[in-house]
Image (spheres, rainbow, N blue to C red):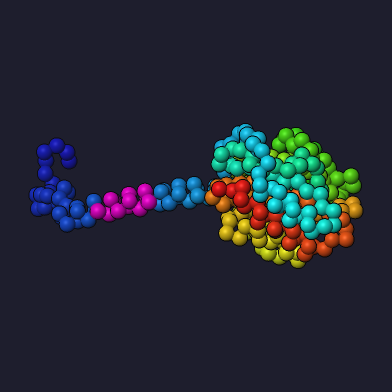
Amino acid sequence: MHGDVDSPTRKLFPKMATWTPPQRQSRTRWVVSAGLVIVLLTALVAVVRQAGSDEWHTRCAEFTPVAGEVRPLQTARQALLSAGHDPVLSMEIVDLDTCATVLSWKSDLAQPAASVVKLLIALDLLQRTSTNSDEVENDITAMLTRSDDGVASRLWQHGGGSEIIARQVKALGLRHTRPPAVAGQWGSTVLSASDVSLVYRHIAGALEAEDRELLTSAMSEAPRAAADGVDQYFGIPSGLPDATWAVKQGWGSSGDRRVLNSTGFVKLGGTYVVTLLSSWRKDVDLATMSAALTKAVEALRGTMR
């Protein structure tokens, strides 16, 4: 029945189909409003978390060169040279906030990379995979956090060994990086301090946010003891204990030299990439190298705002 014809039910309860108790109506509006607030707050929290999770991002495309020699450089060099054992040194610091190179010493000198080359292995793996599977993320985390050599060796072999270096030299525009003379000895890959800066600048500026967070999260969670038992907290972690950092350290031997490198992102007043590369005669012990590199980093904090 349609139109103006009333049904028996309508005649008995004429307002039943349209009437809502006032209290129920008010409660309904309140529930809807509260639900909307919750949705908005959830979205806001997600945005804040997303913004805060990408703390190492930079928009710098080019970096102005260092204006001149800075006093902390001489103090840092002296800390390293006074340890003896014929150290060969190269250093660079770039400011990711002002887009400037604030310190440079023999930064184009190619030095053995040791485990710092794991950054190139990780970047190459990310470029060769369309999605980051759990296996990829676990491998990268183990390689960069605990500096796991077994994972690095497997990824080096699967990626074609020295072909990894060739691909990354081309992709990142590295100028002084060369693969190892012996194909399987990935730690003997050579990089300059300026090339290490380019690697970090690529991570900070060109890498997708998800990949950048994967790498930097692993690097910021490096434990004191590496997978091989070596104390990784030399250089940046011990020299700048009040800073926030995400590091990739390197140690080992290459040819007739012992190698100790400290590299990473540093937040201390501003946001920086700090690179110290060093090699020494084989008669040096790890404790001597570590102490010297840590003193050098302590001296370099004077270049940071």
Vertical arrangement, residue 263 with respect to residue 241, above or below? above
Asked whether residue 132 is in view, the answer is no
User: Which residue corresponds to the image point at 71% horizontal and 36% vertical from the top-left?
Assistant: 172
Q: Is residue 281 shown in magenta?
A: no
Q: Position of residue 98 (x, y in %)?
A: 56, 39
User: Which residue corresponds to the image point at 19% horizontal and 53% vertical from the top-left?
Assistant: 26
Magenta stretch: dominant secondary structure: helix
Q: How many marks?
A: 0
Q: Quadrant of the N terminus?
A: top left
Q: Position of residue 292 (x, y in %)?
A: 74, 58
Vertical arrangement, residue 130 with respect to residue 221, above or below? above
Q: Position of residue 300 (x, y in %)?
A: 65, 51
What is the magenta range? 30-41
Q: Position of residue 2 (x, y in %)?
A: 17, 38
Asked whether residue 47 is in view, the answer is yes
Question: Which residue is nearer to you in this view: 143 or 181?
Answer: 181
User: Which residue corresponds to the image point at 45% horizontal and 49% vertical from the top-left?
Assistant: 48
Q: Is residue 76 left or right of residue 254?
A: left
User: Which residue corresponds to the image point at 78% horizontal and 51% vertical from the top-left?
Assistant: 278
Q: Is residue 34 shown in magenta?
A: yes
